[in-house]
Image (spheres, rainbow, N blue to C red):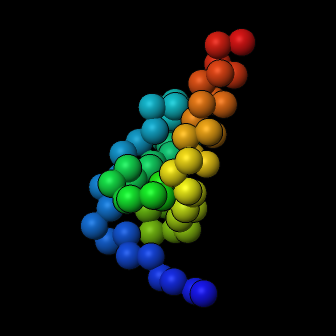
Amino acid sequence: MNRTLDLSTAVWRKSSYSDGGQTNCLEVADDQPGIVPVRDSKSPDGPILVFGASTWTEFVSGVKASRTE
């Protein structure tokens, strides 16, 4: 099944893990039930990766854990 995801109303925010500069800016949209769309803020009309919410939570937990080591 091929579905087209409408993200025209998505509210994007920069990840707190972006360095704050203009070179490493990841944006996520938290307002989509069950999924987490991710894009490069330098290319907002470019490709969007879509992760399942639980997969994204595991990824963020892993990133946080690696920062405390």
Direction from residue 67 to residue 23 in the image, left or right: left
Q: Residue furthest top?
A: 69
Compared to residue 34, the image places residue 13 above or below, namely above
Residue 52 horizontal/vertical position (percent): 55, 56
Q: Quadrant of the N terminus?
A: bottom right
Q: Residue furthest bottom?
A: 1
Compared to residue 1, the image places residue 7 above or below, namely above
Compared to residue 11, the image places residue 62 above or below, namely above
Q: Quadrant of the C terminus?
A: top right
Residue 54 horizontal/vertical position (percent): 56, 47
Direction from residue 53 to residue 59 in the image, left or right: right
Q: In this rendered view, identify the residue nearer to me: 28 or 59.
A: 59
Say how many tags the image has. Answer: 0
Residue found 45% across the figure and 31% down from its top? 16
Q: In this rendered view, identify the residue nearer to me: 52 or 11.
A: 52
Whether residue 42 is visible, yes or no, is: no
Residue 7 horizontal/vertical position (percent): 37, 69
Residue found 55% across the figure and 40% down from its top? 57
Residue 34 image-quadrant placement = bottom left
Residue found 66% across the figure and 31% down from its top? 62
Residue 41 horizontal/vertical position (percent): 46, 52
Whether residue 45 is visible, yes or no, is: yes
Residue 5 image-quadrant placement = bottom left
